[in-house]
Amino acid sequence: MRNRLVGLVVAALALAAMPASAQLAAKNATPSGPVPHTADGRPDLSGVWEIPYTPDMSKQLGGQLPYLPWAEQNFKQYDPGNFDYTAHCLPAGWTRQMNTPMPIEIFQAPKRVAILFEAFSIYKVIPTDGREHRKDPEPSWMGDSVGKWEGDTLVIDTIGFNDKTRLDTIGHPHSTSLHVIDRLTRTDLGHLTYEVTIDDPKAYTKPWGNKRIFNLKPNWELMEYSCEENNKEVTEGHIK
């Protein structure tokens, strides 16, 4: 015990002696190592994860999405600088939350996984107990999700969306027929592969998606997110 305490003191003194830039780099570092597992043998997805800045979900496809005509016209007319629903504290929506460059925290239990989003202080609980979707779920901002394990990958299947959200920050539209499949695979201690498939036959001629890598940040904590309701400056079309 004494040796352990001495080691902790030495480590603390060494950190205090580091320049501020080095301390910040150490805090932001992504750890390396093997994939951790839970008691039931599943890969453990728990932790605070950094989402890379990717406001445009179509970037990997060169921006060329298989639009139906109305969806392409809707996207061309959308101007987030003029009005965006999130400026009035309305929920961003499932796909946009997973694309917002603010950290998320994942909690994993044997029969459910919970994702906490720093952005908009919202959360999502995904059952992984083998249940099916609710019959005719009421359209909602975050949709109706169920999860299952395919080997070492958590697959999240989500339906039941309203049409009040956008798929990402730059404004790709969707309909109430939106069906989203997310795949989360922890490839090592510090990295989580995230792959999303968008299937919306009323907005796009075929499914499409993208793939990104989330980074574990063990020294981060989710911060408080405050959104001002009834943002008058946004409503009037100017910034105070």
Image (cartoon, rainbow, N blue to C red):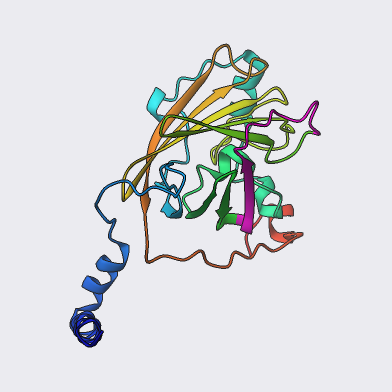
Compared to residue 69, the image places residue 160 above or below, namely: below
- Quadrant, the C terminus: bottom right
In front here: 1 or 135?
1
Tell whether position 205 is magenta: no
| Residue sitting at x 64%, y 46% | 125
Residue positioned 26% across, 84% down in the render: 1
**Residue 85, how many percent across, how many down?**
69, 46
- Give how far across and how far down residue 23 sits, in percent: 25, 73
Residue at the outermost top position: 205
Q: What stretch is highlighted in magenta?
A: 120-138
Q: Does the magenta stretch include residue 133?
A: yes
In this rendering, position of residue 60 left or right of residue 90: left
How many marks are shown on the rendered structure? 0
Q: Residue at x 72, y 60 (%)?
A: 231
Q: Which of 184 and 165 is in front in this view?
A: 184
On the picture, is 39 further left or further right than 229?
left
Q: Does residue 230 sit above or below 147 in this rendering?
A: below
Picture coordinates of residue 183 (x, y %)?
A: 47, 32
